[in-house]
Image: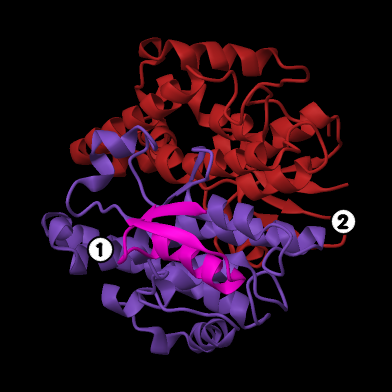
Chain colours: A purple, B red
Amino acid sequence: MVTIYGMIDSGNCYKPRLLMAKLGRSFRHVEISSHDGGTRADAFTAKNPNAMVPLLEFDDGRVLAESNAMLLHLAEGTRFVPQDAYARALTYQWLFFEQYSHEPYIAVRRALLTFPSRKKDATPERLAQTLERGEKALRVMERRLDETPFFAGSAISVADMALFAYTHVAGEGGFDLSAYPAVAAWIARVENDPGHVPMNWLPAA
Amino acid sequence: MVTIYGMIDSGNCYKPRLLMAKLGRSFRHVEISSHDGGTRADAFTAKNPNAMVPLLEFDDGRVLAESNAMLLHLAEGTRFVPQDAYARALTYQWLFFEQYSHEPYIAVRRALLTFPSRKKDATPERLAQTLERGEKALRVMERRLDETPFFAGSAISVADMALFAYTHVAGEGGFDLSAYPAVAAWIARVENDPGHVPMNWLPAA
């Protein structure tokens, strides 16, 4: 059985948990958190030198970092990775968009406002910058979702799971999703897809 | 023939040019730059609402954004995307590492120091932060390259092209690569792989 090292309150860590739940696959959850230094401890950086969660560990001890890489790897051959070459390329596109243009603003602003360990970084300048860039990301998403029900096209894919992870809790970062009706409707579509579980879901021990 | 909209001095835009050159495939280059507002002009944001280059345009008018998505899509079925599932997953991992933990510091510090349009953003705090995080990324790369000749394992992949793009010009961002001998040796290996072209290479018009 694979192990996923992760934080219960991190959207990045939620991504592989959500996918595994939807696929009905068993895994072991090990809580490793940046709040208490767990991600920076030697025992963990020996597994992931980049000192970040989530981290996927296979039975044979090999590991895989980066939440979106886990999504692509674990979902290969399932309905969550498109077969069509262009739809697959768009899945890649939105996964990279999520990590470069979305997470650093929408996830980070939520962390600045809600994680006690990040309070010292929540300067007015940082809050203003993450708000502006996060709203830009939401506008780009709104425009896409005005055209298609899901990011890669007509069917849900791992790109939707990646973008859902922090978008559905964007309100905790001070983003008002009522200004983005197509995004709000898409959130409901993702939640209604079979096998959905909430962010705080964990597998039975 | 596909079109690649991009900037001649951007590492992100160099990535698909380098891959196409190595594959011996023809393409049209159209210079669109953030220096002069080109990426923010309506004619361009109609194609890419995220207002960034590179952007790949197919013959039928469909487009693909995100440099690393282009690499995965264009290289599918070639020697630059591993067949082995785990090596392929590692390729994804290092592509996401590049966009999240490397480019925002190593590329951005180079832009702050060398692009006149970014000079106003080059505060002491920003230069210190990008130096610290960029050096962390280089340490993670050094550790990996102490184990394997290329990021996904024994053979070059698109992950190497993505990480090469800004690492080989990291000196322009004030990073001293002599402190990272495995990284320096890997740069030479990438440059010696057949079909390599420099960053300022463009196809014949």
Q: Could you tell me which quadrant the C terminus of chain B lies in?
A: top right
Q: Is residue A11 magenta?
A: yes
Residue A89 visible (yes or no): yes
Question: Mark 2, chain letter?
Answer: B
Q: From the top left corner, tell me how far across and down residue B136 is, in percent.
A: 33, 31
Quick check: do tags 1 and 2 share a chain? no
State the image quarter where residue A176 is shown: bottom left
Q: Give the amino acid at mark 1.
A: Ala
Number of the label disc, if any, that sits on residue A111: 1
Number of the label disc, if any, that sits on residue A25: none
Residue A64 relative to residue B131: left or right: right
What residue is rendered at 65% in x and 36% in y? Answer: B87
Residue contact at pointers 1 and 2, CB within 8 angstroms: no
What residue is rendered at 45% in x and 39% in y? Answer: B103
Stretch in magenta? A1-30
What residue is rendered at 77% in x and 44% in y? Answer: B74
Q: Give the amino acid at mark 2.
A: Asp
Which residue is label 2 attached to?
Answer: B59
Name the secondary structure under disc 2: loop
Name the secondary structure under disc 1: helix
Binning the other alpha carbons within 10 Å of mark 2 as few (below 14), some (14 to 19) or many (20 upward) gives few
Residue A89 vs A153, above or below: the answer is: above
Looking at the image, which is closer to me, A41 or B174? A41
